[in-house]
Image (cartoon, rainbow, N blue to C red):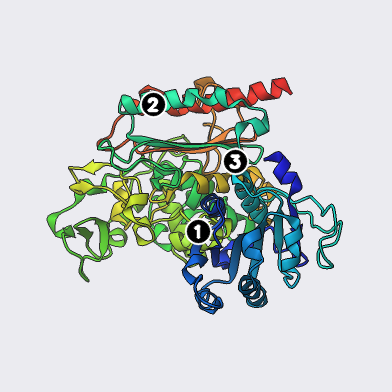
Amino acid sequence: MKAIEKAIVLLNNRQAIIPVRQLEKRKIVSISFGLANQISFDSLLNKYSPLSYLNADKYKDSTDLNDLEDDLKYYNTVIVAIDNSEVSIPKVQNFLEDISKRKDLIIAFFGDGSSLKNLNRISTPVIWCPKNNLEASIVVPQIIFGGIAAEARLAQRYSTQYPKGAGYTTLVTRLKYTIPEEVGINSNDLLVIDSIAGQAIREQAAPGMVVLAATHGKVIFNKAYGYHTYAKILPDKVSDIFDMASVTKITATTPVVMHLVEEGRLSLDSTIGYYLARARKTPMNKIQVREVMLHQAGFIPFIPFQSYLKPSDHSADSSAAYPTKVANCYYIKKDFFNNYMWPKMLYSPIVTRGKYVYSDISMYVMQQIVEQLTETPLNTYVLRKFYYPLGMHSTGYLPLNRFGEDRIIPTEDDTSFRKTLLLGTVHDEGAALKGGVAGHAGLFANSIDLATYYQMLLNKGNYGGKQYFKPSTVETFIKKESKVSRRGYGFDRADRTQEYPSKLASSQTFGHTGYTGTCVWVDPSRDLVFIFLSNRVNPIRSTVLYKLNVRSHIQDVFNRAIDDAKRLQ
């Protein structure tokens, strides 16, 4: 693979289209012209951005490819993987030339360089790889999106369009997908993770799980274990979407807070009452935003809103009077949050101000504040501002609005409140009653998307050639800010005295856990992003995941492997 990387030449990149940027503005389609490893090629593309697929074989009997061209009307970016046999066909050449004038065309050409002359009339990017094998199909997509840098030049002249020495250099701007050996880690040293995961599933800590680790900007491990449920019908996949529970706090609400603080629209020193008029005659009025973000505002930990429900508050059918879906066949009455939940929080007692008491109410409050300032619902804002630009196309609230049930991991079989298996509706009761979009819970995501976001934070706010936060903003939020706890603003942090989140976690580690059996931890000292996703609450709320210390043990496997690799350098 390293040899292939060094041999690939990027041509015709005068407009710096490669690495691809502004993902939020792109509608990408990958066209197959019979490449042997097209599935692997598309799979790697899909790790960086959502895309559609078209098979040119459908149009093979036509004398031209005009129908194929018309079928591209909804796309502005076209990626074509092609080899020697197809690139020599005149109608294919005409198609490529015509499309290059109308859309952003990227050609991945695998094969003999002598066939480059067939692309003489093409002025859009051509990534030429002399090899046409599985490894090549894995490397080229990463050059397209900036996971791997292009460096090579043509060693000989192939045409006037492609002379000796032609080629462009690019920089690495996104995560690379590779094997542990590239960072000096022996894959065999990570096999113990299989054993830990296997034991956890056998002892019913969770029916399935996904583990990811990235270090030095390279994803070296991403593996799924087990099944969606103990019925063992659907196996877990690395692309599966999990209920993130409290990881929502640092992946949805906190980024918006960071952004608004950076823009000067939100001050950590201002009070809740300054931003929220309804809070001005309540106990929350004088509490500072920084106290809320540190869980030192004095809020009670949570309010069991579902315990206060009356039969008249909900219905089995949706209607104008009951518009908010809580779960299948369960709808809450109109304005239930504004008229009942929010007042109950506003007037809840403030009893531990100045002390560390972890409370979900904190992020209910912050959601209200950021939605006032952005004038946009939280779920819409994070999609537009962060997830779409970053290429996090599997992350967001209310996943059933965008994805099929087979991609979403079910959580609890709720027999007491919603009386149904929770699949695609948030596990947290308060977030569910709010309609699925809350500051403390409700986000769904997969491992690849989370790796992207937390690599951006590890990069001090930079990813894909775009600066999402100033380095100083990231540093302010991820470092220890509390004088009475380990916390930062929004973020949880390591506590070495408690061996939290794991025995070997460094004091720089920041992240969060989620009640459903998830966690994200970033260790700048090891340049490590560690992600663990599970549904430990399926079918009921099991504590086996905690008793076995599954997350901690797996995290330390990576910590130890990285430390060993450093010592061997």
**Around disc 2, counting alpha carbons within 10 Å, would you say few (fewer than 14), some (14 to 19), or many (20 or more)?**
some
Relative to 420, is 78 above or below? below
Residue that extends furthest to the left in the rendered view of this protein: 311
User: Amino acid type of disc 1?
Assistant: Val
Residue 90 sits in quarter: bottom right
Between the C-alphas of marks 2 and 3, the distance is: 33 Å
User: Amino acid type of disc 2?
Assistant: Gly
Relative to 370, is 420 above or below? above
Q: Which mark is residue 198?
A: 2
Q: Considering depth in this image, is 101 or 383 the residue closer to the camera?
A: 101
**Would residue 40 be seen by someone viewing this image from the given angle?**
yes
Between the C-alphas of marks 2 and 1, the distance is: 35 Å
Q: Which mark is residue 382?
A: 1
User: Amino acid type of disc 3?
Assistant: Ile
Q: Residue at x 41, y 28 (%)?
A: 197
Q: Residue at x 34, y 29 (%)?
A: 201
**N-terminal-most mark, 1 or 3:** 1
Q: Is residue 322 left or right of residue 15?
A: left
SS for callout 3 = helix
- Front position among marks 1 and 3: 1
Q: Quadrant of the N terminus?
A: top right
